[in-house]
Amino acid sequence: MTTIAGYPLPVVLGQLVLGFVNGSFYALLSLGLAVIFGLLRVVNFAHGAFYMLGGFVAYLLLNWFGLNYWVALVLAPLLVGCLGIVAERMLLRHLYRLDPLYNLLLTFGLAMMIEGFMQQQFGSSGYTYPVPQALTGVYKLGFMILPIYRAWVILASLTVCFLAWLLIEKTKLGATLRAATENASLTQAFGVNVPVMVTLTYGAGVALAALAGVLAAPITQVSPHMGTSLVVVVFAVVVIGGMGSIFGSIVSGLMLGFVEGLTKVVYPEASTTVIFVIMAIVLLVRPSGLFGRD
Amino acid sequence: MKKHQILGAVSAMVIATALAAVNPAAAATDQVVIGDIDDMSGVYADVIGPNGLEAVKMAIDDFGGSVLGKPITFISADHQNKPDIGASKYREWADQSGLTMLLGGSNTGVSLAMAKVAGEKKVPFFAVGAAGSSLTNKDCTPYTVHYSYDTTSLANGTASAMVQAGGKKWFFLTADYAFGTQLQEAATKVVEKNGGTVVGSVRVPLGTTDFSSFLLQAQGSGGDVVGLANAGTDFVNSLKSANEFGISATMKPAALLAFISDIHALSLNTAKGLYLTTGWYWDLNDTTRAFGKRFFAKTGKMPTMNQSGYYSSTLTYLNAVKAAGTTDSDKVMAELHKAKINDMFVKDGYIREDGVMVHDMYVMQVKSPEESKYPWDYYKLIKTMPGEEAFGPLSDSTCPFVKK
Amino acid sequence: MQITWPRRIEIALLMFGLCVPFLGIYPVFMMKLLCFGIFAAAFNLLLGFSGLLSFGHAAYFGIAGYVTAWLRLKIGLPTELAILAGVAASAMTGLVVGALAIRRQGIYFAMITLALAQCIYFFCLEASFTGGENGIQGVPRGSLLGIIGLQSDVSMYFFVLAVSVGVYLAIKQIVGSPFGQVLKAIGENEQRAISLGYSVNRYKILAFVLSASLAGLGGSLKSLVLGLATLSDVHQSTSGEVILMTLLGGTGTFLGPFVGAGIVVTLQEYLSDRVGAWVSVVIGLIFVVCVLAFRKGIVGEIAKQFRARQVSVS
């Protein structure tokens, strides 16, 4: 068996491929978080809870209404996004004029409520969501067998990330959003309805989280706590990438997926912590993140 | 009303009700209070969990609902797989609620913490759900009874069956806490004794749902068996992943601990051919079938080994209390060690000095869908291990107060 | 000497505290409440008085608990020394984390404390002395100074009560001192404090270390009370709980953290048996309501109304 630095090549490649899959998830999730922070200055601790709701809505759509995966991919983000809009209008709205720490705490409390409620209704252990028929099967890559579904996840996440980046950086709508972030009153003076934009942006960010949840459902079990451990990791990704930068969060999400994969070869138990070590280092050396503009 | 008045009133109400709640109930003497602390909603909820409560209630009803002239009380709690919650609840019940016997549910780590409380508070502890053999070795107490099974018997059954069937090079996927480590240790001993080798292992956090990267490591090790030293939904997920990533084609999965609830969740198609070791199966004989059908009527599922273990241990305890004529822990433990247990769970079972309830263990193989003739017809019996063979001789025990 | 209302409330609570074992209230429950009260009060030193949100404060609470538990169980070190060692461990941890974190402000400061707390959690998971997922169990309480046995719940309770009162008074002292005044100034307007010539970073680090040490004191006591040190103590969720307790009780007040701890611990104890996972929903709801409407917390709101009344009366 060929080796790289003493580790068998098939193992390294295999973990990198899986790392690519995880990285795409991180990219998609951190995209939503970065959008919300970049444009709203809200540190959305409830992001993991909305991700979890996305998965659950997909599961319930299948089991209660017989609606398949492809419908869920569109419907779940819409439904959860609406929930996010309700949360923004009723709760977050009141805190914008205060220290950003308060909206962090609010979303933290919101996450507890959502997760607690789902746990009460559905218990802690997970529910299986089947891989959609069209995506079953595997690719034989030689060094490992890759389920087709995982390749799809990579494709879908990267496409969505690219489209979002395009929207925000290259279109007029995106430009208006960015203007509203930098100077809300001036933008409003130009006739743009800033509060509506803010609400819709939060909804969009939440919808992205829910989309990630639907994509994740066939891989992990759909369970009330599927987002809890993930949200802190995603925060680390966003901080590393730069809290205002969409591009930064996408790139660092992918990068960190690879780093995590490599760590699993060398020191598996540390794979969950390596991201935080990197985050701490980045924050100390370059606080605005690798691509940040703050 | 002003804000602060509302707050003050709410706080006062909360404090008042809480104080009322935490006030102890006066414990009547010779009143039997049975407690159950188990994982009710997490990874192991289907192994015993809420349906296990039914088994205990059935036992209490079958016994007559009262003993020594007083009604039997039954309380339960969810330990959420946290040792501190399990231990604190046990201690609180012993201090405040007059607990006379605790049924220990799944999770060895929590049961180890609870065993310490058993020794401290001197309240009999029936560890039914936990596998870890250390409960009757270095962590033993005079008040612990390890009832249904343990890691030693699981390894002696499943690991030796698989090594003898040709699986010589083992890679372990181990749940990262007491249970997984002890199961891996026991299996390693058996593998090596039978001429096999362990080529590697990886520790996996409890509750992991995506095993892909761990299985990839297994594949990279060049082994021919992947020993799944985990249980409950961990086992179900790891086996599914092994199939998904084609690992099962080159490495045979070893189900070191599997319950009928897991096989039911996996379906025979996925689980066929697996060897597993169990202390009880509903379809063994007429008595087991009768109990199985009663339990099924109440819960819609056939009982796992531990759920029927709950039924049997409750009856065994109540019989011991009746024989002792008191709920005094030392007298009841003395009766328990004298008892010969003959019920739907075991024939000629007895509780050894180290706390092990010695009884036959069965090595089973999961049937294929074609071989299964009716619902829940999942196992075929490969071998019956007599108690002393399954659990090892008393002389092997490292329990400090066992005289050898 | 005029006995003011706040003083009356303090005395009433102390009287109540002294009577607890005789009122039939479960001492272990009260002790747990007091340990978390100490933890919350320590946290409040940072959040309420210095304006610093530490997102991973459970790290100091838990590390001290582990150190004390290990020293008691494996080495048999006398109880008071084991507690001091635990406090020292959390002080050192606080020094390291604080020194790193104060280089940034606001959200970034909070995020660094979070990242480092996760690393500490990982360390506790992997290190052999902590026992990983199993934790350290069966920790003997020993005796105080070799004289007063702490095995009995009642004597342990009075010890914990004494320490809690000590912590309460110590925090009052710290906040009222010139050092405390500077901390408050930094919390209100850091730029102004810098322009006034204070070496702000030194003050912040010292506050952080003090807070970590006191949190450690709470953790050490808790592991002796319950006889266990487990991963739950260093987990993210415990960090979240202490934030909730402080916010609910009232940041910037002295009794607030204890009141908040009391309510949260009581809710968890009382509700979890009866309503299972609804506890999280209730606690989350309280959190949300507090952030929206009762930002001063219970004690804070009461104090505010009280002061307003006093002014209008006089």
Image (cartoon, rainbow, N blue to C red):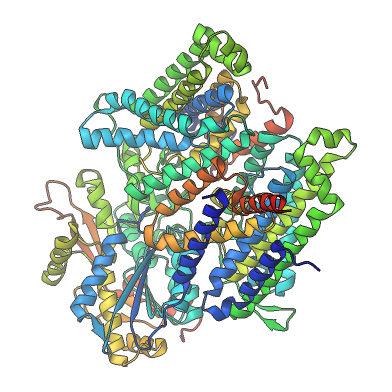
The x and y percentages for residue B250 are 34, 40
In the orientation shown, which residue stands out farthest toward the bottom? Answer: B325
Image-based side of B227 in relation to C139, left or right: left
**Can you say whether C182 is above or below C14 in the image?**
above
Q: Position of residue B102 (x, y in %)?
A: 38, 74
Residue at the front extreme, as displayed: C313
Residue B28, percent from left and from top: 38, 86
Q: Residue at x 49, y 67 (%)?
A: B16
Relative placement, left or right, of B227 versus A231 is left
**Residue at the image point whose x is 54% and y is 69% from the top:** C29
User: From the viewer's perspective, is residue C37 above or below residue B138?
Assistant: above
- Can the viewer see residue B274 in this picture? no
From this viewpoint, is residue B262 visible? yes
Q: For residue A84, what is the image quadrant?
A: top left
Hey, which residue is sitting farthest right in the picture?
A: C197
Q: Residue at x 48, y 30 (%)?
A: A88
Q: Reply above or below: B138 against C302.
A: below
Query: Looking at the image, which residue is at 65% across and 67% down?
Result: C221
Name the foreground residue: C268 vs B118. C268
Quadrant into which the N terminus of chain C falls:
bottom right
Give x and y (percent) for residue C304: 66, 49
Quick one: A83 or B152, which is closer to the camera?
A83
